[in-house]
Amino acid sequence: MSEKRLFSGIQPSGPIHLGNYLGAIKQWVEYQHDWDAYFSVVDLHALVARPGVKDLRERTLDTLAMLIAIGIDPKSATLFVQSDVPAHSELAWIMNCFTSIGQLSRMTQYKEKSETQGETAGLFNYPVLQAADIALYNAEVVPVGDDQLQHLELAREIVRSLNSYAGKEILVEPKPLLNKSSRIMALNNPEKKMSKSVSGSAIGLLDSEDEVARVIKRAVTDSDPNSSTPSGALKNLFTILESVSDVQTIAKFEEMRVGGHLRYSELKEQLIDDVVAFLRPIQQTYKTLRADTGALNEIRLQGAKKAEVVASDTLQKVKSALGLN
Ligand code: TRP
């Protein structure tokens, strides 16, 4: 195992869809072999939207089980729930003291989300908790989508400010690792990102065959599939095909397109079959894991213990560097 640290987090905010998977967490599975990887289900971040007591509790376990089902191995990576490790909240408080209102006011996510979620202090301070998540593990890199780059830059600034106050390099300045895969767009609107909250937009990893078929059949196909400049909608369907189908199938459809005899109906039939076949083993593993709450809670506990060792060590160093003990 490499000693280089990597950290990323995912909110337990509902079912994971193909866009989340192909755009981001699929790569986590690869990273766990190359890095000393820490992956957290960030329930304290999800609480900001006040999702409801039962939903938050259930979705945290759902997300944990889904991460394992897609291939995160709790023996290889450290997989844990954020609120199980109290050092996150404690370092977040400390980091708040090295963050200005001006910096937080510039966050575009705050500006956007406060319109629907209300202007809570939790939403405002969200990026500070995120900075604490990363800094606790001295993570050098953080795989994120481009919507998180601003939060990452702020995390670097907070770390710099704390280090400079302490007069030594207590915390590591993290760098973003941009997801290299293409972004999956909404099936009903290739201009927008795939989103579970919009009907017809997403394929959930837990969707049934019927649901998958319905969304793919209705996917936007508003232009000639054989045009020399493929539309966004067609490109999106091909991106999905390239992720779930075998090489021969991908080559066959590419040839049809280049040869000018591609039909949307045929492409969609193939996509339905291949997406369903791709999801089947994930869904089976998920169901087994999720049904055994005892075993899942044991994985959760072990993950928290592993994370705690590193987190409390970092927190102690920060506290003593700041005169807090
Ligand atoms: N804000 C991230 C998102 O919404 C989730 C997150 C929380 C995170 N803490 C993190 C991501 C630390 C990377 C590192 O996607």
Image (spheres, helix red, strand yellow):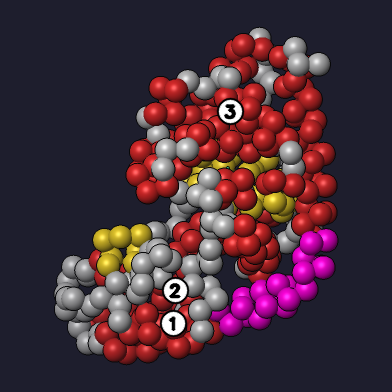
Identify the residue at horizontal 68%, vertical 37% (top origin): 88
From the top left corner, tell me how far across and down residue 93 is, in percent. Answer: 63, 27
Residue mark closest to the camera, 2 vs 3: 2
Left or right: residue 126 versus residue 114 is: right
- What is the three-letter code of the residue carrying label 1? Val
Say which residue label 3 marks.
Answer: 173
Residue on which the image places disc 1? 212
Q: Amino acid at mark 2?
A: Ile
Q: Is residue 68 above or below residue 178?
A: below
Q: Residues within 10 Å of mark 2 (few under 14, many from 20)?
A: many
Instruction: Please tell me whether residue 297 belongs to the stretch shown in magenta.
Output: yes
62 relative position to 225: left or right = right
Separation of residues labelled 3 and 1 (CA atoms):
42 Å
Q: Which residues are magenta?
A: 279-298
Image quadrant where one finds the C terminus:
top right
Circle 3 — which element?
loop
Task: Give the x, y percent position of residue 150.
Answer: 43, 36
Name the foreground residue: 14 vs 141: 14
Q: Label 3 is placed on what type of residue? A: Glu
In the image, residue 25 above or below residue 154: below
The mark that comes first in sequence, 2 or 3, is 3
> What count of labels does the image hold?
3
Real-space Cα separation, disc 2 to disc 3, in angstroms: 36 Å
Q: Nearer the viewer, residue 17 or 234?
A: 17
Q: Which residue is mark 2?
A: 203
- How far from the left and from the top, in percent, is residue 301? 81, 54
